Amino acid sequence: MSEATRIPELFGSLVFNERTMEQYVPQSAMDVWRGCLKSGQPLPLSAANEIADAMKTWALEHGATHFTHWFQPLSGVTAEKHDSFINNAGGGRVMMDFSGKELVRGEPDASSFPNGGLRATFEARGYSAWDPTAFAFIKDGSLCIPTVFCSYGGAALDKKTPLLRSNEAVSREAVKLLHLFDSQKDVSKVTPQVGPEQEYFLIDRELYLKREDLRLCGRALFGSKPPKGQELDDHYFGVIRPRVAAFMKELDEELWKLGVLSKTKHNEVAPGQHEMAPIYCDANTANDQNQLVMETMKKVAERHGLVCLLHEKPFAGVNGSGKHVNWSLSTDTGENLFSPGKTPSQNAVFLLFLAAFVKGVDEYQELLRCSVAFAGNDHRLGAQEAPPAIISVFLGSELQSIIDAIVGESDYTETERKTLRIGVDVLPSIPQDTTDRNRTSPLAFTGNKFEFRMLGSSQSIASPNVVLNTIMAQELEEFADILEQSNDFRADLQNLLHDTFKAHQRIIFNGNGYGEDWVREAQRRGLSNLRDTVDCMPAYIDPKNIRLFSGHNILSETEMRARYEIHLENYCKVTSIEAATLRDMVMRGILPAVNRYTADLTQAILHKRELVVPCRVEEDLLSKLSGLTASLYDTMAAMEQAMDQAPDAEGGIEAARYYREEIGRRMEEARQSIDRLESLTAAEYWPYPTYADILFSV
Ligand code: ADP
Ligand code: MG
C-alpha cells in the first residue's frame, strides 16, 4: 500500500470519531447525541446505552478488552482506572458488557488526587462524567472515555471542566458582540482554536538510568555546562539523526492513529532537543491531544532505547523546553476573528477583538502569568533563552502604526481626522501577514493568532487557555455593554477603540524582551514582574480574579482557593523531593567518589615526597578538592537541617516561601560546589554521566 493511501487509512483508526460512530451507532441515537451537543443537555440513558454498545463492539474489534474513564486531575497529568468489559454470564461463562451508565458516569476512588480541601475526607469519592464533545479512543488495549472529574457537590476537581466552561463563556460573549454588526448576524458559535508546539529532549536510556535526579525529578540537579553547547547553532533545524528520525516516524504514526494532526518536526536549539507541532484544532480537543502527545512521546522513546524528558529545564545552562500555545477564535461561519479582514467591517471586528485582547492581558496580566507558574517553569522563565517573566504583547510594527493612529486620533484636526478615522467605512488596510516575528516576546501576534510562549513543556495547556478564553469573554462583554447602548455606532466604536488602546498600550512591547533594559522599562510602565511560583500564586485569590472567574462561572471562589493551595503544596513537594534526591546523590555518590580520588592523590603525594619528586599539581588539586568537599558537606548539613525544620507542605504561602528560601537556595549553593568538583575530578572517579555524555548520546 502506498503512503498516500496507508496514512489516510491509519489516521484516526483508534478513535471512535463521528465517521466511525455513523457506522456503528443507530441513526436515531446519533440524532439524539447531535441534539445534545447543540443544546448542552445530558444524554438520555437509552441513547447512552446504544452508543455504549456500539463503542464496545468497535473497541472489541480493535483488540480492546478494558475501558477507562480518562480524566485530567489537578496534578496536570492524566489519570485512568481500567475495568474490563467482562461480566458474569452464569454457568462459568462470561460475556462482554458495557452499559450507557458506565459510559456516562464513573466513580474512581479518587481520594488521593489533589483536591485542595474541596472534597471532605469522609467523602472519598468524586465522579467522572463523559464529555460527549470529545471522542473516545483506544490506548494500550483500553477504550478511553474522555471525562470531566467533579466532587459530589459539583466542584471541579480537574483541568477539563473549567476549560469547557471557558470555551462556552467566550463563545457566548463573542456572539453577543458580533451580533451588533450587520455582517455577523449568522454567527451562532465561536470556538477557540489552539495549536500547541511541544518541545522535548531525547536522551539515551542507559545514561538516564545512571542519574537518580533525572529518574526522580526529571531534571539534572547538577552538572557543568558541556564544552560544546548550542553556541554554533548547528542543532536548530539541523539534520535529524537516524535514531531520532526513527523515533519521530513512529511517534507520528502512533499520533495519527489517535487522530492527532502531527505535522511539523524538527531539531530545536539545544543538543538533544526537538519539537513537534500539530495542526491546530478546537481548544478542548487540542488539550486532550496534547496530553496524548506527551504520553506517546515517552512511550515511543522507550521502544527506541531513549528517554523523552519533558521537564522545562532538564539541564541548567542549556536551552530549556517550552510549549507555545497558538490561540485564536473562529466563528461557525468559518472566519478567524484575529485575521485582519479585507473589508472595512471585517477590520472593525478585528480591531475590536484585538483591543479586547490587549485590554484583557493588561488587566489580568498576573492571572495569565500565574497560569504558567510552577516549580519546573521557574527555572526557565526569565532566563536568557526563555521569555521574560514579565507579561507583554508583541504586535509588530505595522499593527503598531495603526494603533498609534487610533490612539493619536484626538490630536488631529477635523479633516485629518476624517481620513484617519477607524470607523466602519474608512479603515486603513491592515497587512495580512506580519512577518517581523519577535522571538523574545512572551505573547506575540503572529498574523492571525496569538502565540503564548511562556508555557512550560510539561504542563497541561488547559489553565493558560482558560485564562485566555475568560479574559476575552470579560472584555467582549464589557464592549458589548457599551456598544449596545450606542446611538451612534460608528462614533462609539471609534471612541471605544481609541480609549481602550490608549488606556492599555503599556502592555504592548515590540522590543527585545531578553534585555535588562526591558525589566526597567516594564517597571516604569507599572507592569508586574512576578519572578516565580511563590510570587505568582496570590493572583489566584486576588478578589479581582475571583470576580472574573466566578462571574463567568469558570471557577467559584472555593475552587480557586483550592487551586491556590494545590499549586503551593505542589511547589513545596517538588522542592522537597529534589532536595532529598540531591542529598542522596551527594552523600552516597559524589562525596565518596571525590574522597576516593583525594585519597589516591594523597597517596601519590606521599610517594612523590619520599622520592623527592615535585608534586605541585597533586597538592594544588588536593587542596582545591578538599576545600570544595568541605563546603559542600557544610551546605548539605545546613540543607538537611532546613529540611528537618521545614513546615508541612500544606502550609500555604508561608511554607512555599520557606522551601524557596531555605531549601531551594541551598540546593543552588550546593550545585556551585558540585559543578566545580565535577570539573576537577578525574573522569574515572566521577559517579554520574556528565552533560556532555548525556546531551551528545543520541
Ligand atoms: P512557528 O514555529 O513559526 O511558530 P509552527 O508551524 O511550528 O510555527 O507552529 C505554528 C502552530 O500554530 C501550529 O500548530 C499551527 O497549526 C498553529 N496555528 C496556525 N494558525 C492558527 C490559528 N489561526 N489559530 C491557532 N493556531 C494556529
Ligand atoms: Mg512557534
Image: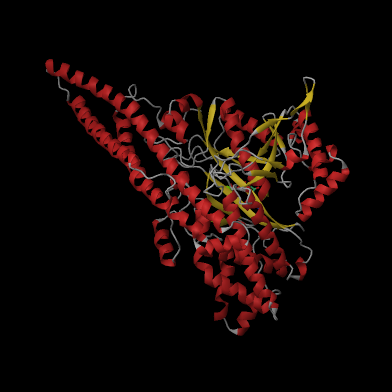
Observer-nearest of 457 and 212:
212
When the figure is inspected, residue 56 is found, relative to residue 483, above or below; the finding is above
Q: Where is residue 249 in the image (x, y as percent from the top left)?
A: 64, 31
Q: Is residue 330 left or right of residue 666?
A: right
Furthest-front residue in this view: 122
For residue 391, above or below residue 74: below
Is 579 rendered above or below residue 169? above
Quarter occupied by residue 405: bottom right
Q: Which of 314 and 131 is in front in this view?
A: 131
Horizontal and vertical percent for residue 460?
57, 45
Left or right for 527, reference 425:
left
Q: Is residue 127 left or right of residue 401?
A: right
Q: Which of 664 and 195 is in front in this view?
A: 664
Can residue 532 be seen from the camera position used here? no
Q: Nearer the viewer, residue 208 or 384?
A: 208
- Return the x and y of residue 387 as percentages of the image width and height: 48, 51
How many numbered marks does the figure carry? 0
Residue 431, image x, y percentages: 64, 62
Name the residue furthest bottom.
414
- Give the residue at x 51% y 54%: 561
Residue 633 position by quadrant: top left
Specify the quadrant of the image occupied by residue 11.
top right
> Which residue is at a point 50% across and 41% down the rendered structure image?
269
Left or right: 166 in relation to 122: right
Q: In this figure, which colouring scheme has been used for the structure?
A: secondary structure
Quadrant assignment for the N terminus? top right
Q: Can residue 470 be seen in this view?
A: yes
